[in-house]
Image (cartoon, rainbow, N blue to C red):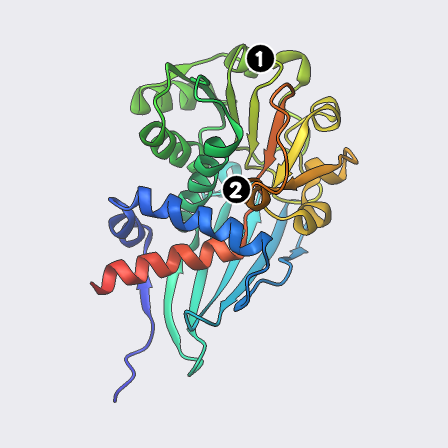
Amino acid sequence: MEFLGPKFYSANDVNRCLSNESERLIEVIEESFVTFSTKQAGFIQPQRMAVNITEYNSLMMKPCISLSNQIASFKILTINQLNEINFGLPVIQGVIVVFDTISGSVNAIVDAISVTDRRTAAASAVAIKHLCKESDTILAIIGTGHQGASHVQLLSAYKKFSEIRVFSRTKENCHAFAKKYNCIPCDSVKNAVKDADIIVTATTSISPVLFKKWIKHGCLIIAVGAPLCNQRELDDEIMLTSQIFTDTEEGAYASAGDVILSNAKIHGELGNVINKTINIDWNTTRVFKSNGMAVQDLVTVKLILDKDLK
């Protein structure tokens, strides 16, 4: 049988395959949290690898293997904080290479950014399901890049909000984003998060953009940006006085700047919250530090390939 080589899935292909699959995507991402935290047999996820190229440019690699599904994924990313300013390019670029674990063949090469955007927003939906109250209806999103867009689209479909506020460092971007996604544009982070029940930070900042003195006690903060150990979005006071949850404790202690630079203690993994093996303190502020897991890349690309082959 002639091998025709791997199929390439562009961002448009990813969006086409997942356009009506948000509910199923959230389900498989929720399952992946439990798979990881309970260390289910057949899944192998080594620690992600990050190599600094320059002060502002890094290479990141995330492998994962699912023996039961006979599939392996390897995500390769570059993160260049100066790309938008210098080249008009996205800060994060990359691909996910998908292998057959039996033959070793490359089955597909998938645009990594569209996958990351969607699976990260789905992970945030899972965090909202398990870490916020039904009465929490005011959402604030800090950052209007890819992640901000994917979050407002998926979360607004997942849960009914009375208000969705947005802030960007660039006023024009903020207003354009707000108009496109029917949000309330805000002129500062402080105004965006005032009395907000759920706050999503989606930036590549190297210093805190969110401070405890601005937030409502008992809110849920979902920190999805600042993926490197020298980056952070939340101030020490938030990190040291909140109940901190993450996708992977080992990964967060090794590479999440918000955790490392504040010396914060992680309460537990979201997978164990879902399993009801750890308790939530509803009387305090809760933080979900979303580091991103390779297992979530894998289950997302599997969903894409399964949908495309139907």
Determine contact: label 2, label 1, CB under 8 Å: no
Asked where in the image residue 166 lies, by quadrant, the reply is top left
Amino acid type assigned to the residue bearing label 1 in the image: Lys
Which element carries disc 1, helix, strand or loop? helix
Q: Residue at x 45, y 77 (%)?
A: 101
Amino acid type assigned to the residue bearing label 2 in the image: Ile
Q: Residue reaching furthest front?
A: 277
Compared with 259, 54 (above or below) is: below
Q: Tell me where residue 112 appears, x and y as whole percent.
A: 43, 54
Question: 188 left or right of 184?
Answer: right
Tell me the quarter of the image containing the N terminus: bottom left
Q: Tell me where residue 42 appears, x and y as whole percent.
A: 52, 69
Q: Residue reaching furthest bottom?
A: 1
Question: 15 left or right of 243?
Answer: left
Residue 190 is tagged as: 1
Asked where in the image residue 211 lies, by quadrant, the reply is top right
Tell me the quarter of the image containing the C terminus: bottom left
Q: Residue at x 24, y 61 (%)?
A: 308
